[in-house]
Image: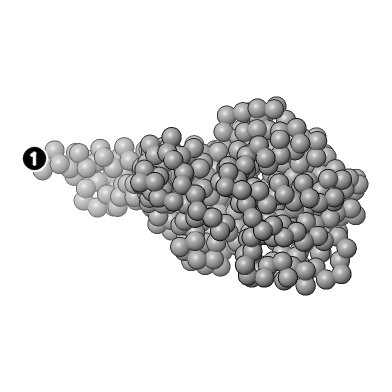
Amino acid sequence: MADLLLTLVFVGLCVGASACLVYWGATLGRVVRTCASTPTADEGLALAGEHPPTGSVCVLIPAHNEADEIAALVASLRAQDHASVRFVLCCDRCTDGTADRARRAAGDDPRFEVLEIHDCPPDWAGKVHALWTGVARSSAAQEAELLLFADADTRFHPACVRATAALLEHLQLDAMSMVSTMTTAAWFEKLVQPAAGLELFYQYPLTRTNRGRTSRPFFNGQFMLFKHEAYEAIGGHESVREELLEDLAIARHLARAKRRVGVVMGGRMLTCRMYDTWGGFREGWKRIYTEAAKRRVRRLRRSGWRIRLASVALPVLAAGSVVGGLSPLGDAAGGRAALLALGLGGLAVWLAALVMIYRIGRHPVWMAPTHLVGAWLVSRLLTEAGRDLRAGTPVRWGGRTYVRPQR
């Protein structure tokens, strides 16, 4: 009986470590391919130096009660060095003085326009309505050749608009989105945020969008740059009026219209702090995952279990294989070398993939081993999102409450 138990443990550890080696080896390969095929916004700087973009750009920012953030955002916008750029701040039903702070921060800079929006129709999402209103009411937006939509919690490098406009032109795209570099000030930004982002990109691989594939196209609402004609051709934000994750909905519209689109990595060109509290982070990412899963409970639960298996159980089994190889188990089962080789190989590719992912995202690399904990917490967020969706729990976002039925 004891020999049978040892054999079962030995086989279980070998299978787990082998699965870790295969899964994370494939993940490492996917990361390498993504890096090779995904441009960076920094590359646009050289392009802009050689061929300065001349087209006019209008940057539109929705802001709901962003009084604490708006001045820093405006400062980064005022520093933009593009020759022809205007800024429209769409202050959406603000009750905290956001508009007044925005005007003070903009000062006498003639490039800025502050719009105050006092209501939102019941059949519109707040952010979407704010941006649609900005495009409709601003003459700068109506006249611009390029429209750039960004979030109030982003910060622009001084050359961001110029570099991305040059990159859009060089790549001959109709629309382009950018993955921002996330801040890492709070504990949950260091511990959970890398795993949260990795799961989203697992569901929506950047390579699919950049290769023109119409299945699961991806855009990031923190930064979306359009040729004006392409934006109007897909119906603008009015076409996604009810969406709480308007960026993915717009990406699907662009794919169906067979527009040339691309996603680039932000690097130092764009930074973002999505949430400043753990509670806000939890609720925000549950909303993102719910909408990304098209409000399907089964998909949310399946994703949660996949993360528990691939990102928690497999590395633990690989570590257990190493321990088993160094313990009497290896001698008793007659497989010390196999346990050590498979366990060390699995852990090596797991860490190699995570180190590369953390470096790309500019997360603290030394935190990579804690991905186990972050992944477990993300799996719980996915499970909670499915539970909330099934229960019909309302979603509160941007000053409004939405009841989103499951599909």
Residue 57 appears left or right of 384: right
Q: Residue at x 47, y 52 (%)?
A: 395
Q: Position of residue 189 (x, y in %)?
A: 52, 61
Q: Position of residue 1 (x, y in %)?
A: 8, 40
Q: Residues within 10 Å of mark 1 (few under 14, many from 20)?
A: few
Query: Which of 142/324 is in front?
Result: 142
Query: Which of 243/48 is in front?
Result: 243
Residue 260 picture quarter? top right
- Secondary-structure class at tag 1: loop
Q: Residue at x 51, y 41 (%)?
A: 292
Q: How is the image coloured?
A: one colour
Q: Amino acid at mark 1?
A: Met
Which residue, given by chain and number where applicable, does mark 1 sit on?
A: 1
Q: Is residue 43 above or below residue 185?
A: above
- Can the viewer see residue 375? no
Q: Position of residue 158 (x, y in %)?
A: 80, 61
Residue 315 appears left or right of 171: left
Quadrant of the image containing the C terminus:
top left
